[in-house]
Image (cartoon, helix red, strand yellow):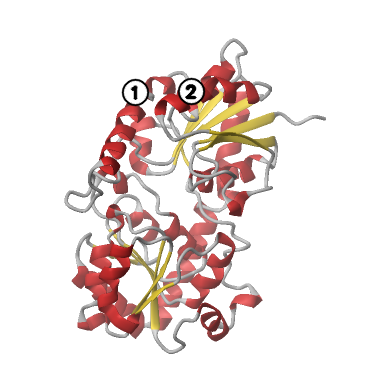
Amino acid sequence: MTRPRVTLLVHDLAGNAIVRAAPLAQALSRELEVHLAGLLLSGPDVYAPYRGRFPVHALRCRPLLPAVLAAAPRLARLVRDSDLLYACKPLFTTLLPARLAAAGRGTPVLLDVEDDEWSSRAVDAPGHGPAGWARRVADTHGLWARAAHPLTRGVAGVTVSSRALEARYGGTLLRHGPDSVAFNPDRPELEDRGALRWGFELPLHRRLALFAGVPRPHKGWDALLRALARPEAAEWDLVAAGAHRPEHDAAAAALGRRFHALGPIGNTRMPALLAAVDAVPVLQRDVPFARAQLPAKALEAMAMALPVAGTTVGDLPELLGEGRGWLVPPDDPAALAAALAEIAAAPEEARRRGRRARLWFLREASVDAIARRLLPVARAALGG
């Protein structure tokens, strides 16, 4: 018997937008034939960690609104044979081609909302965001995201990643975490921490705090550096994995030999890096974009049973509460330094909280958890 085909339309197949779409696709593949479709806005090919996982229909496109609008009908034609369309983000890049493909055919359309697209990551942090053209681009993105909002009316179902987005759009809450098999602290090849540190050229006898990703204004990079400069955190080094601008590394250079910049680390190597470090600070600032965001790096650390120190912003209290991590106020370096000191002084408690965090992750954010909540939404949409 032929399984119904669902096509997930991804905002930018070449970039991070596919990170949310991939576990949704994996969950849906248990009952449906899954395809991915979308524009290649930031590169010539599908984001490397996700190539080859599913059939892909892709179009190269410049990241400008006129080009996106011109590409939407062509993308719609590529996905018209789908039985179900799933637009990942309420934007012209995804929801517009989905609605065009469904027009006249009665194909149901689902919508997934991962971020608060109305709030700009650049302008949410006064005094910290980019200047000039970059700020104008950020402002324009929020404007066009609001312009696309009428396309959300009449969709067959909505899924969201956070409580703030649930309050705006309704629908089903889906936490998205990494692959629970790859991100598993009990894998035998991850047991020798010394060998792992040697492989990343990290010190063997220091406590290591990991910041993974790009230090965008809402992620609290400055607060992290100030916390590590305090005497309470003197035994901690900072490991940075990601594409950093020179000014970020220059600011961290004040830590001297306590700062280790690794550059971009591929998704397949992240479990090994997490197994090599001692804690992951997730310092979301109290701004609209961060309140609606589900930080992927927090869930990766939780999957690896690592201690996480997160701010009381957005859904982090729900993730890390009940003894699953450490919660500190936003923009409070002293509180973070104290949390790191506590993690260092109480390793057994750190391990207990890390194990509780992994159990929560398996129950609430794994592919199994997504499938339990998402497949009924898909069945209902296909059933009319």
In which image quadrant can residue 213 be found? bottom left
Q: Position of residue 159 (x, y in %)?
A: 47, 36
Q: Quadrant of the C terminus?
A: top right
Q: Amino acid at mark 1?
A: Ala
| Rendered view: 260 above or below 324 | below
Q: Tell me the element at label 2.
A: helix
Q: Which residue is mark 2?
A: 96
Q: Position of residue 59 (x, y in %)?
A: 58, 33
Q: CA distance from mark 1 to mark 2?
A: 11 Å
In which image quadrant can residue 378 be found? top right
- Is 220 in front, or is 182? 220
Q: How many other residues sit within 10 Å of disc 1, few (<14), some (14-19) or many (≥20)?
A: few
Q: Position of residue 170 (x, y in %)?
A: 40, 31
Q: Look at the image and tell me whether residue 253 can be seen.
A: yes
Going 39% across and 86% down the picture, which residue do you hit?
A: 206
Going 67% across and 47% down the picture, which residue do you hit?
A: 53
Going 36% across and 38% down the picture, which residue do you hit?
A: 165
- Residue most toward the left? 127
Whether residue 29 sits left or right of residue 360 in the image: it is right
Q: Amino acid at mark 2?
A: Leu
Q: Look at the image and tell me whether residue 79 can be seen.
A: no
Q: Which residue is mark 1?
A: 147
Whether residue 95 sits left or right of residue 34 in the image: it is left
Q: Tell me the element at label 1.
A: helix
| Rendered view: 312 above or below 32 | below
- Residue most toward the right? 1
- Is 324 in front, or is 28? 28
Q: Position of residue 117 (x, y in %)?
A: 35, 37
Going 36% across and 30% down the picture, which residue do you hit?
A: 145
- Labels in figure, total: 2
Q: Quadrant of the N terminus?
A: top right
| Rendered view: 108 above or below 284 | above
